[in-house]
Image (tube, helix red, strand yellow):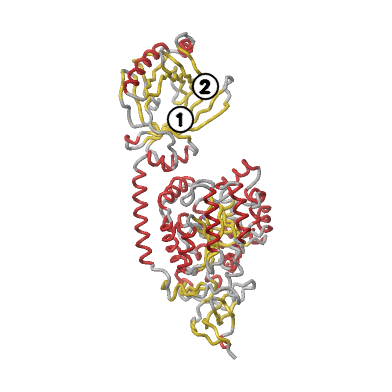
Amino acid sequence: MATTCDLLLTNAHILTLDESFTSFASGAVAVENGRILEVGNIAGTYTARETIDCGGRVVMPGLVNAHTHAPMTLLRGLADDLRLDVWLLGYMMPVEREFVRPEFVALGTKLACAEMIRSGTTCFADMYYFEDAVAQAAADAGVRALCGQTVLKFPSPDAASYDDSLALARRFIEKWKGHPLIVPAPAPHAPYTCTVEILRACAEMAAEFDVPLHTHLAETTFEVDQSRQEHGMPVIPWVKKHRLFDARVLAAHCVHVDDGEMRALEAAGAGVAHNPTSNLKLGSGIAPAARMLELGVAVGIGTDGCASNNDLDMFEEMRLAALLAKGVSGNPTAIPAKQALAMSTRIGARALHIGALTGSLEAGKRADLIVLQLDQAHSWPPFERDPDAVYSRIVYSAKAGDVVDVMCDGRWLMRDRQLLTLDEGELQRAAADVARRIDRFLIQREQSVLQKLIAIGGATEQESFEVQVKARVASADTVHGALTSDDITVIRGVHYHQYDTYFFFDDPEQGRLRYREDEFLDDGEKVVNARARLTLTGPSREAAFGSVLLFRSRFLAPASHTPRFYREYFRPAREREVEKDRRRWLVAYRGAQFYVHLDRLINPAVDGYFVEVKSRTWSRRDARDKAAIIADLLQRLGANPNETVEADYVDL
Ligand SMILES: [Zn+2]
């Protein structure tokens, strides 16, 4: 007697993608209660409430995107072809700080789901802020997701501190644990953006709730070098030492790992998400995916977020994974099409630690499947001699647009290329609106060097006023001599080597930005200490008292990035370098304090010495009074007040 079921897909070219790659040239899939009952030559053994004739098309498991940041669809194409630090610190993070709210996250995820469903993805591993909104949007769209709530050591759009961040992750997991589509997880962003305590707390939380843990590991050589420097070991042993692998880890990237580290990943049962496009686009490198697979690591394929890809197309991604493995190894048998497709389905699900639920068409698993049309010009003709030829057609020739129908958890999400759970037109209108607002924000910011400085957290000290003068002196001796006289008291003195890089902008009103490195020298002229500072100087002097000038608007900040970062971020119209030897004294003279600088210019090479006298000031009257003393002091130091030079030597 025939068994009943909800749905029977018949006349299908079935690729189960199970361990032995079982396939049926013309088979059927029986679905009951969102679960796969049976797969094979079973059409006659079931009576179904609904039967669909697949017309010989391919039926296979839905694709598993092993790593993404779904809401970042809203940042797609916002800033490209930039170095990782400029891209992340200069654009992504400031925009995220300003715009990322639950509504933004929900909209971005829905847009992502529309794109994913269209391209045959039924399951994705996510990591973002306000992950609750990601989970809700994915569940509403009917897409399966491993949702990682981001935990960071610094304030983020959804948490003021890492304690808040951990508490948020806990509440998130409590809320979603047991949901039919959503698997919640803590997501410590990366070892370099977390503390050891955060990594441990997240691993413990994952173990406590028996959920996976999603993170980024060993993405760049910079990260690995830094780990070696700071911890004396690369990333994988470092996180292992701190017991991250007590949890079932899904590690994105693992681009820079050696054999020993790969074995450690395998031994820990960690899954890896290989993100070939993102790693290429950000210049991070190429992960040793073939070697990891060889060593038994579950390596899935991910798109990463749309800001670094820029799409969520798993067809492109698996083709690239298969091609790159061949290109870097010189071995065309590395990652064959069949294996690439398995990485995008069964192995991917295993990497997410949900292999029992999805990833292949097998009795007992959830009904996550797609129907593919392989009769387009670009995937024609079919060959039947080799049963594996169909995998080549899918991986090397098929396109995302060849996906006709998509089912997740037994529910149709797309039929005949029509989305059933999302209104694409509405989503696109709303996303265009967000893009307009982000554009406005960035246009405004880009007009002001100060705003750009603030956006990267680069202006810690506010505007100040300063009176100063700078002039040539015949010899250093007159200065040293004057400083030993009775009426000038030297409070302290330092000696350093100073390297300045000035950035000039087309609009002089923007002022100029100075990147200054000070190397402090001891009596033996040896470097004992160094620091770097960034100063935004106002466009012009405020006033002149004889040769003494009043300046304002100096925004000071420790320079935590390289000059290269600032150059690529601020894009100055012009640059100028100045290098000098400077002796600096704080002196008391006629009832006020002044800084005296004795400079010898090295670049540009200028003969002789310069002396500068300056003081902070807070009112015009104070400025005038100090200007008079400065003019006097300048003469005492042996300089001619009529032979002054421009403040920063940049015109010499
Ligand atoms: Zn990522």
Relative height, residue 146 to residue 563 (above, below): below
Relative height, residue 637 to residue 408 (above, below): above
Gap between marks 1 and 2 measured at Cα: 16 Å
Could you say which is closer to the camera, residue 3 or residue 112?
Answer: 3
Q: Quadrant of the C terminus?
A: top left
Does ligand 1 reach within 8 Å of label 1's beta carbon?
A: no
Amino acid type indicated by mark 2: His
- Residue in the image at 57% along x and 54% along y: 215
**Where's residue 80, x and y in %?**
43, 51
**Where's residue 519, x and y in %?**
53, 27
Occupied quadrant, residue 617: top left
SS of the residue under disc 2:
strand
Residue 498 visible in the shown view: yes
Relative height, residue 587 to residue 248 (above, below): above
Mark 1 = which residue? 500
* Residues packed near mark 1 inside 10 Å, few (<14), some (14 to 19) or many (20 plus): many
Q: Quadrant of the N terminus?
A: bottom right
Mark 2 = which residue? 495
- Residue in the image at 50% along x and 76% along y: 381
* Residues packed near mark 2 inside 10 Å, few (<14), some (14 to 19) or many (20 plus): many
- Residue in the image at 35% along x and 51% along y: 439
SS of the residue under disc 1:
strand
**Where's residue 316, x and y in %?**
50, 63
Relative height, residue 95 to residue 548 (above, below): below
**Where's residue 417, x and y in %?**
42, 73
